[in-house]
Image (cartoon, rainbow, N blue to C red):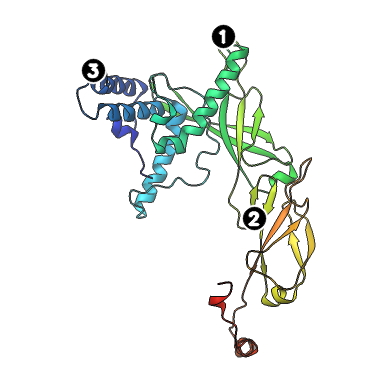
Amino acid sequence: MEFKDYYQILGVPRDATAADIKAAYRKLARRYHPDVSKESDAATRMAEVNEANTVLSDPEKRAAYDALGRQAAQQRQHGAGADFHPPPHWDAGFEFTGAAPNGGHGMDDAQFSDFFEQLFGQAARARRTGTQSAGAASAQRGRGSPARIALDLPDASHAPKRTLPLRGARLDAGGHLVNEERQLQVSIPKGVREGQLIRLAGQGGPGLGGAPAGDLFLAVQFKPDARWRAEDRDGYPPLALAPWEAALGGPVQVQTPGGATVEVTIPAGWKPGRKLRLKERGIPAATPGDLYLELHVALPPATTEAQRAAYRALAQAFPHFQPRTQGA
């Protein structure tokens, strides 16, 4: 994915004030609006201008975009070229609370680029949903604010409390972007699933005219972990077996996401792709998930003459074994 330079699209410097961005947007809108422009690519250019303004005129989106831009520059310095890959959970802790005051008029989701959709599309839709539900109760109540929280999979079992740094931004009196951060204590519900929303009442956008603040909705994501992956409330840990364990079977020790160590009997005659199910040993909940052990064979290194001799003896014991034709 190519990184889109929204500052370049609007023709403003990175330290531009809100007034600078507003003026640049209006100038380009007069030039490229399809109703008045005679340029052949007016519609495409207008969509780019709207998209850039949607991000840069929103202080919180702009702060997140600026942080991502610094990461993109680092990737280019390391030879990544034009192909940009956002780091995992790059937006964890960012709040996207406000609607852009000037941009995106008449645009639907289909008119935003893949770059925008991947980075901001989910948050924008969540914000609209939160705004609609809040508006039904009171037109003056603060906006519902989406953010993300990145957790380790064991957190789903232990229901811990976490201190979450929330990054946002505001405009100072001169229209310059000021980054802000606040700390929230969050209780993680036991059995939380990836994609689940944790609601923090009154921690969203501020209300107007003395009305209460909106709610903050934290979308749960699990951090990448080589020990296991999660699907709904089921856990999938890889389990390495020695060749003799795979062939002969026997007991092995396995750690669950909840931290318990259980003994599992591996059946003899391992087969590629085989899984062992441990019922209700996945993520705990009213209906606990299961744990599926994904079995694979790990070969011991042959660094001594005795170990190399053992491999030669194994080869002699299986003279007709052809690993590259097994299962063909």
Q: CB of mark 2 within 8 Å of CB of mark 1?
A: no
The tag earlier along the polypeptide, 2 or 1, is: 1
**Which element carries disc 3, helix, strand or loop?**
loop
Looking at the rendered structure, the kind of residue marked 3 is Val
Q: Which mark is residue 209?
A: 1
Say if 184 sits above or below 174 in the image. Answer: below
Q: CA distance from mark 3 to mark 1?
A: 40 Å
Mark 3 residue crowding within 10 angstroms, few (<14) / some (14–19) / many (20+)? few
Q: Which quarter of the figure has residue 147?
A: top right
**Which element carries disc 1, helix, strand or loop?**
loop
Name the outermost residue toward the left: 38
Relative image position of residue 160 (x, y in whole percent): 72, 41
Q: Which mark is residue 36?
A: 3
The tag earlier along the polypeptide, 3 or 1, is: 3
Q: Is residue 315 left or right of residue 256?
A: left
Say if 127 sits above or below 72 in the image. Answer: above
Relative image position of residue 169 (x, y in whole percent): 48, 28
Mark 2 residue crowding within 10 angstroms, few (<14) / some (14–19) / many (20+)? some
Looking at the rendered structure, the kind of residue marked 1 is Gly
Relative image position of residue 307 (x, y in whole percent): 63, 86
Determine which residue is flagged by label 2: 228
Q: CA distance from mark 2 to mark 1?
A: 49 Å
Looking at the rendered structure, the kind of residue marked 2 is Trp
Q: Which mark is residue 256?
A: none
18, 41: nearer the viewer: 41
275, 172: nearer the viewer: 275
**Which element carries disc 2, helix, strand or loop?**
loop
